[in-house]
Amino acid sequence: MAKILLDNYCFPENLLGMQETIQQAISSGEILHISDSKTLAAVLTSGVQSALNDPRLTVSYEPNYVPVTPPALPTLPTEQLRRLIRNTIKLELLENNVGYLRIDRIIGQETAAKLGHLLHENIWNKLIHTSAMIFDLRFSTSGALSGVPYIISYFSDPDPLILIDTIYDRPTNTTKEVWTMPNIIGDRYGPKKDLIVLISKRTTGAAESVAYILKHLQRAIIVGERSAGGSVKVGKVKIRDSDFYVMVPTARSTNPITGQSWEVRGVSPSVPVTTREAVTKAKALLSARKAFPKAVKRVSDIIRRFYSSREKIEALLNQLAITNFLTVLSEEGLAAKLNYELQTVSEDPRLSVKIMQEVPVVAEDNPNVDAIPGGALFDVEILSGNTGYIRCDRFPKLSAFVRVAKEVWENVEGTENLIIDLRYNTGGSSKVLPMLLSYLYDTSSNPIRLYTIYDRIQNVTTDYHTYSNLTSASYGSKKGVYVLTSYYTAAAGEEFAYLIQSLHRGTVIGEITSGTLLHSRSFRVGDTSIVVTVPVLNFIDNIGECWLGGGVVPDAIVLAEDAINQAHDIINFHKHIQPFVKQAAILLETYYAFPEVASKVGRVLQSKLDEGIYRSVIDFESLASQLSVDLQETSGDHRLHIFYCEIEPESQHKLPKIPSPEEMGYIIDTLFKVEVLDVNVGYLRFDMMADIEVVRAMGLTLITKVWNKLVNTDVMIMDVRFNTGGYATAIPLLCSYFFEAEHLQHMYSISDRATRTRTDVTTLPEVLGQRYGSKKDIYILTSQMTGSAAEAFTQTMKDLKRATVIGEPTVGGSLSSGTYQLGDSILYASIPTQVVLSAVSGKEWSISGVEPHVSVQASDALNVTLKIIAERQQKLESGD
């Protein structure tokens, strides 16, 4: 039986070890003790099915079995074929120009070719002009797979041809690709008109293949029950001279779209219903879908007329034109599909398509908070610390604001900071925003562009600037402004909070706002329940960014009831920001290895301070983060950073601990990997650069366990792909092993800004053990992880043309960075103090890292190096 399976089973890869398994079962003697033949067949069936997880594999005992071969359809007389087709194919024209076609047997291509014109004239011509079709395969229990591409071709375009299936046949060990056909008799139904395929538990074989392909081509909606789960081809093979037979699937189908098949599992319907209800459900689906094209066109028209981001309209309309809606089953599904397609192209959360819901009741302002006394437009107070407080629950019309503005601002004019409370502001007039913001700037300066609004309906773009003719003195641009928000804050209140952030004029504190903007309009789509919401206004800030809504995220997120206390804490913290920023600039001027860059960074920090960039900073953590970003962006040096630490950090110059003899072996085994590869190539991987004193302490052990295994190789590969750095003090010693003792080699020079010294670094005249010398080839492997002292070693060997570097550019580390405290705060600056000068060019090493001679992915570096070594060795042997 094992040989039958090996020669015939369509999943030969699953049969690994089958021969041995069966032999073991026979050797155990259990099967041999079964005397009843039918029981034995059942036991064998259970065993092979459980072993291969395939219910189609069965063993039967049939002493009187006589094979029956049904006649091939094409060999039947033409008149008999006509009667057969009339009995297996039925058609009907339903209301609303819907065609109904029932096929109970899939005929093969040969039969179709023989009766093609008859089928075309009597069946297809009656259906081709329908606007939709119900294709009934519920009772299709037999047929030829060769007819599948014939059917699929009628529901697709002639070009391009589509790969719809692959059939693997085990007995011949061949795979056949099944494509749609370029030429068929008559017109095609095409890929656009609605098609519903009905299936049932009885649907099997070629009909399942048709349904599965049409479903996954997204050409048809499948309605009914899960199909039977047949097979492409099943053979019944006799076991030698016995009366036992094995049923074995000899071919398998693999769909190129899914990588799976309909076999065994069957085809699952898109819309599950009973067989009896299938036709009724199909009619209802087609009736519902009849409105879909009009709905899609209506959505396209709305976008064309009203969408405010005009540059995206063409792409959106093109997307809707090419989107396949053939498998959408309901209005809900159509809304979801439209929303997905529009969001994918626009990336605009304001543009949405949804099913119309009941209009929610807008919540009143927080009932636990008293309204502003007397119905005043603004509540104005002076809080502790000489902090002004203005509460506004709804922005008035511009004319009303003008009447009260003088009184409001004169009350807070002398305060040091200002809190504007919008926690209960539900909107109001947006036209008041430019004047309100104008009071937060200096009226003596030139007008400042605050924001721009593009109105799609009016096709008008309006720039809004600060006013120069205010009714009273402005609050000015230097004092701190703190805006309080909550999830009640909406519409114009959100716009004000957003502008305060985008203009860097203040700090927003509280909860994320509601996300209720007045920039969009909603349209019902025809007679459906679908609503499309389209932004008709673009609210563009002063750097050209369009606000896409979604609520304003505060700089400091706290509960609304805690916002005032948090504002006072941030006001106190902000008093120290300017000294911190200036102290960071002074430390750079004093210690940074590149003085000309330090001056530039200092100017940029002061400029950002003046622009209000640091108003979004609320604590030491966010200040350290913002300063680090500014330092690195301006200098291009990722090593520069600011961090905060509650306790004083340990000195980076602390002397390393000398390991004990017991620790040495563990350290060497952990950090070093040594191997001699083919053709006497040495491989040395080391993942850290140890301090020179540690290296000397481990000297004899290191020589014995590592170096002596490599020193006599012909070529060496040094792998620092995982070496993030360490101490640079051992670099001269390490490099010395690859140069001659007689001529000390100038490797590089170190200029230290902190100590104002310059040191020339050379190889050493004496080393422990044998040198590798200056003649044999060296290769160094690098990655984006390679950093600090490992980079210095690599760059030195590259500059001196002593090694070929292969891999990725390194990280761009530093030989030494100093840690300096900003005043007496918990902020510290890590500043590279040393610059390395090349011994060859005298120029500074780039902070961007070491560029390899051969750039490859780090994971491929070793294999590429071995190939290069092999090619060079081959050239040497051939004398080229």
Image (cartoon, helix red, strand yellow):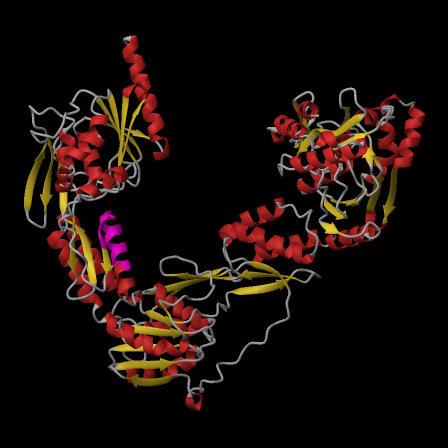
Q: Which quadrant of the rendered structure holds the C terminus?
A: top left
Place residue 529 in its image quadrant.
bottom right
Q: Foreground: 18 or 378?
A: 18
Q: Which quadrant of the rendered structure holds the N terminus?
A: top right
Q: Foreground: 370 or 58?
A: 58
Place residue 485 in its image quadrant.
bottom left
Judge whether residue 866 can be spotted in this image: yes
Stretch in magenta = 625-641
Q: Foreground: 449 or 627?
A: 627
**Magenta span includes 629:** yes
Residue that sits furthest to the top in the current view? 879
Residue 411: horizontal and vertical position, in percent?
A: 29, 85
- Principal SS element in the magenta part? helix
Judge whether residue 613 can be spotted in this image: no
**Magenta span includes 405:** no
Residue 167: horizontal and vertical position, in percent?
A: 68, 28
> Residue at point 82% right, 27% down?
112
Answer left or right for 614 relative to 654: right
Q: Foreground: 230 or 303?
A: 230
> Residue at point 23% right, 26% down?
709
> Residue at point 88% right, 34% down?
122
